[in-house]
Each structure stands twice: as structure tokens, then as C-alpha cells.
Image: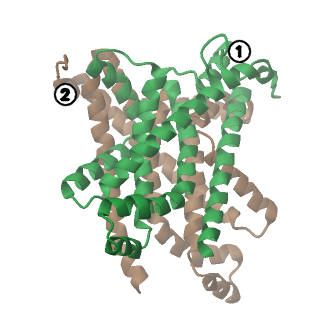
Chain colours: A brown, B green
Amino acid sequence: MLKYKFDWAVVLSGTYYDWLVSGVKVTIQLSVVSIALAFLLGLTIAVMRMSKLRPVRWFAHGYLEFFRNTPLLVQIFFWYFGSYKILPTAVNDWLVSTNFEFASAVIALTIYTSAFIAEDIRSGVLSIPKEQMEASRSSGFSYIRSMQFIILPQAVRITIPPLINQFLNVVKNSSLAMTIGVAELTYQARQVESYTFKGFEAFTAATVVYLAMSIIITIAVTWYSKTILSPLKAR
Amino acid sequence: MGLDFHVIWDNLTYFFIGRYPHGPLGGVALTFYLAVVSCILSFFGGLILGLLAISRNRLIRYPSEAVIQFVRGMPLIMVIFWMYFLYPNLMGRPMPESQTVILALTFFTSAYMSQIVKAGIEGIPKGQTEAAISTGLTHRHTMLHIILPQALRNMIPSFVNQFVSLIKDTSLAFIVGVSELTMVATQINNRSLIYPTEIFLFIAFVYFIFCYAFTSLSRYLEKRLAWAKAI
């Protein structure tokens, strides 16, 4: 049935192995940078979303809805091809002077993910009893400080499992960066395929790496929920 | 630098229906076609996979759980490449690109749908099953006539959300050259060269309108269901 000769040596050693390994490195770099930035941005948006000021809240709401309901691929294309008309020239020059493909991918991934993270954080915050906020406000903390010292530290603890899952999503979503030529794992697998015609081996290697990352992350979430989160809830 | 949206006006029909009726359907219409067909197929795929994953037989449950985890751990782009590459090798003949994408989207989304089905069925109180069994229904009939009708109704909002994800995911059909909205946009961009900002803003907005409409529908349904349950 299958007239295909397997040759695993292609992806397990030599040049093509090096390509794949460099792809894994880029995937991890891209994901780690994006998730870190997306966390900070998402936190900001989440706090804005719960603000007392209506325009601030509306802005955050619009941001969330817009970026969550637009395909990531379109966002990547927008930042890569179209951002030069709306960004200030100085910012644009700086981006071009760095690795522009990588930078566009980071911007798109960060903004896309931050919208999801903001919602995760918001539902974490909403799960903290209202009395916590009232108590800290009546002890004299300002709104921002109550958030900073009382609410967010508790909320973040609850939000960690969904955040880790978001990291998994970022790892998977980072594969879209191949469309603008970022040499991450999927891109390299594709390269190996077109150079050697050993698509089966190349895609298997990439799939195994993605699966390994997802299994590790799933185990981390399960472990965290079981050993850290459930004892806290029981108290 | 001002934005000039003339390029959108000039290509408006191309954005929405591609070269139809003088050529194949494309643009927004094709995006919808891909999303609707894969949604219907993956509903059944998800239903079957979800039911297998809660089977009492371990020999059925573990493999289906493994398949679900496997697909959920993979980026969609990899699934598309696998289909694109594997199908001609296995079957000995190539498949049209749009079918490849529908197959990949169905396979991918079924795994996510199965999680919805699982959660929906587990969300129905145990008493329902016990009551049905003690009335003399078999396990299969209990599932078919008692549990699923209730569970499916509760799942509707999640299914609508999954449809929104599907609309967004169809943009990846671009990778294998299917002329849906994103592909059409890159074509127009390649032809006109100097309006990338306008073009990608426009299609982002088109996607947003459709996805937001369905997200709102899902929220509305969720509220109605909660209300229906309360009385």
C-alpha cells in the first residue's frame, strides 16, 4: 500500500537534525518572549476592564473583543505587512533594524494572547470574594494598591492553570509565524521536507516535539492544581 | 501617512465571492463554506469521539482519550500539513486543497468538540441516568433518549463558540492555497503592493464582524438556557 521508504537518519542526525533543533529553539524563544509580554499586557487590560471609569472599561472591552474575534494569521500579516503606515517612523525603523519577522510575530502573538489572558485574569479576580476588596479599601488602600497587594496576588494563584494552558496555546500558535518566514519548528520541518522529500519523518519529528511540550505542560497544570491549588481551596 | 480605502471598494466583490460566477467561489463566501461544512462534520466527529471517551470499556476509553490529547497537543498547521502530505501518499491520488482543509479542520475540531460533549454529558445529574435505568431503559437508550437531548441543548453555546474558532481557523487554508478571505487579501495585496495596511485592516474587520456576531449569539443563548433552567 505504502510505497515509501522510511529513513529516520535524515532527521536524527546531520544538517537536517540541526535545522530542526534550531527550529525548536526559535519556537521556544518566540513563545517565552510572547507569553511574558502577553501576561503583562493582559494584566493591564484586565485591570482596565474592571476600572470604575467608563471610557477605560470600554476601551479594554473593545480591545478584548476585537483581538479575540480576529484570526491570528490576519493579525500576523497586519503587523508584518501593514504596520508601517500606522506606527511612528522611529518605532518602525527600530523594528526593521532588529529581526523584523520575529518582532512582528512577537507583537501579533503578544496582542492576540493578551486578550485571552486578560479574560482569564478577570475571571480569576471575580472569583475573589468582594469583601476582600471592601476590607482593603476600608483599611485605606487605594483601588490600584488594593488590586496590587490584596486582590491580584490571590487571583494570580487561581489563574496559573489557565495561564499555563495559554502558554501551550502560544507554543502551538507560534507555528503560524512560519507564514512570514520565522524559522521556527514548523518552518524547519517544511524546509527539511522540501530539501529531502522526507516529509513523513520531518513532520513526525515536529509533531513529537509539539506533543512532548503539550504533555509536559498538561502534567504541570495537573500537578499544580492537585498539590497547590486544592489544599488552598480546602482551607 | 493617510490611509486610502479605494483599493477595498475596487475589489469588493472579489473580497466577498472571489471570481464567482466566472470562476470558483472564493473570499468570504468560501470562508463560510469551509467553516460551515467542517462545523457540521466535526459536530458528528466530536459526538462520536466524546461518547467513546466516556465509555465504560477501558479498551475503548483509553485509545479515544489518547487520540483527543494527541490532536489537542498539535498546532492546526501541522494537522493541515499532515493531511496535505499524507493523503496523496496513502491514497495514491491528490485531493483538492479545499477538501484537504475541510478534512484537517474536521479532524482538529472534532477533538475540541469531544471535550464539549464530554463536559455536557457529565454535567447532567446522575439521578437522570439512575432513574432511566430503573425505569427499565438500557444504557444505550438512556444515553439516546434521556441524557443526550438534555446535554446537547446545554452544549449549544459552546458549539457556537467552536464555530467562531472555526471561522478564525479557516484563515489557515491560506497555507495550502485555498482562495478564502485571507488568501484573497494577500493576492490583492500582491497585486496592489502599496495598501497592505488598508487591506489587512479591512479583512480583520470583516472577520471581527462575523465572529463577534456569533460570540454574541452564544452569550445570548447561554443566558436564555440559564433562564430556561431556572423555571
Q: Position of residue B185 (x, y in %)?
A: 65, 24
The one of B11 and A86 positioned closer to us in this rendering? B11
Q: SS class of the residue under badge 2? A: loop
Q: Position of residue B60 (x, y in %)?
A: 23, 52
Q: Position of residue B140 (x, y in %)?
A: 32, 59
- Quadrant hosting residue B110: top left
The one of B148 and A8 positioned closer to us in this rendering? B148
- Residue tagged by mark 2? A13
Three-letter amino acid code of the residue under disc 2: Ser
Q: Position of residue B35 (x, y in %)?
A: 55, 36
Discs 1, 2 touching: Cβ within 8 Å: no
Side of A71 where B139 appears, left or right: left
Q: SS class of the residue under badge 1? A: helix
Which residue is located at x 43 percent, y 49 percent? B112
Three-letter amino acid code of the residue under disc 1: Ser
Which residue is located at x 20 percent, y 58 percent? B58
In the displayed orientation, state which residue is furthest to the top.
Answer: B22
The one of B144 and B23 positioned closer to us in this rendering? B144
Q: Is residue A176 above or below residue B73?
A: above
- Residue tagged by mark 1? B192
User: Looking at the picture, do discs 1 and 2 lie on one chain?
Assistant: no
